[in-house]
C-alpha cells in the first residue's frame, strides 16, 4: 500500500476524540462520529459525559455513517443504497435484522419519524430504546424496539473491523481510493 493511500485511510478513520481544533480539511466519517458522540451525550474531545443529548440526530448520524462506510466498501453501484446498506449491516452489524435497520434509516432520515412502509407494503413502527442489551426486538407484527446505544457501539466496532480488512484487501483499497475523493473529505473554515 502506498504512502498516499495510507495517509488517506488514516485521515478518513481518524478517531473522533483526536481533535486539534484546526479549520481545514477533515474526514466526513471523523466529523460524523464526533457529532454522533456529542448527540449521544459525550464530549467528543475526551469522551466525558455531558448534560445534554439529541438522540434522534445521534441515531441519524449512525445510520448515515453506515451509508457512508458502505459506500466505501461497495462503491456507488447499480445495486443502490438499500442493497449496499443491508449488505453492510448483514456483514458488520447484525445478520438477522438488516431490513429492519434499513427501514429505520428510511424513517428517520427521510421523515424524521419512526414509521416506514417498504415497497412491498410491509409496515414498520420503531421504538428507540437504550441499554436493553439486544439490538432489535420484534414486539409485534409491525413493531420493533431498537437499542440505539448498542447500534452506535456496533457501528464503531464495524469501523474497526473495516479498518483491519482495508489494511490487507486490495479490492477494498481500490474501492476506498475510488470513493475517497468524492465522499471522504469536508473543508471547514
Image: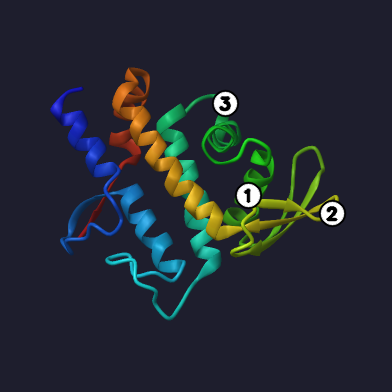
Task: Give the mark, 1 or 2, whose residue is nearer the N terminus.
Answer: 1
Res. 160 image quadrant: top left
Per the image, the residue denoted by label 1 is: 106
Q: How far from the left and from the top, in percent, is residue 70?
A: 47, 36
Res. 16 image quadrant: bottom left
Secondary element under disc 1, as helix, strand or loop, is helix
Secondary element under disc 3, as helix, strand or loop, is loop
Q: Residue at x 40, y 42 (%)?
A: 159
Q: Given the current orientation, which residue lies at the most extreme top position? A: 170
Q: Closer to the camera, 187 or 175? A: 175
Q: How far from the left and from the top, in percent, is residue 105?
A: 60, 50
Secondary element under disc 2, as helix, strand or loop, is loop
Per the image, the residue denoted by label 2 is: 140
> Marks 3 and 2: CB-CB under 8 Å?
no
Per the image, the residue denoted by label 3 is: 79
Find the distance from the CA under tag 1 to the CA under tag 2.
20 Å
Residue 129's place in the image compared with 2, above or below, is below
Task: Give the mark, 1 or 3, whose residue is nearer the N terminus.
Answer: 3
Amino acid at each position: 500500500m502506498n504512502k498516499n493511500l495510507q495517509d488517506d485511510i488514516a485521515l478518513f478513520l481518524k478517531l473522533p476524540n483526536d481533535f486539534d481544533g484546526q479549520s481545514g480539511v477533515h474526514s466526513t466519517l471523523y466529523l460524523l462520529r464526533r457529532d454522533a458522540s456529542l448527540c449521544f451525550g459525550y464530549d467528543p474531545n475526551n469522551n466525558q459525559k455531558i448534560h445534554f443529548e439529541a438522540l434522534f440526530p445521534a441515531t441519524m448520524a449512525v445510520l448515515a455513517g453506515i451509508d457512508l462506510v458502505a459506500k466505501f466498501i461497495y462503491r456507488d453501484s447499480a445495486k443502490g443504497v438499500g442493497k449496499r446498506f443491508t449488505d453492510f449491516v448483514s456483514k458488520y452489524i447484525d445478520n438477522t435484522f438488516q431490513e429492519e435497520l434499513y427501514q429505520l434509516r428510511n424513517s428517520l432520515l427521510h421523515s424524521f419519524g419512526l414509521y416506514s412502509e417498504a415497497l412491498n407494503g410491509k409496515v414498520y413502527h420503531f421504538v428507540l430504546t437504550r441499554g436493553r442489551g439486544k439490538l432489535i426486538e420484534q414486539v409485534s407484527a409491525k413493531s420493533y424496539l431498537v437499542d440505539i446505544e448498542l447500534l452506535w457501539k456496533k457501528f464503531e466496532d464495524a469501523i474497526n473491523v473495516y479498518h483491519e480488512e482495508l489494511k490487507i484487501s486490495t479490492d477494498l483499497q481500490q474501492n476506498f481510493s475510488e470513493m475517497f475523493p468524492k465522499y471522504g473529505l469536508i473543508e471547514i473554515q
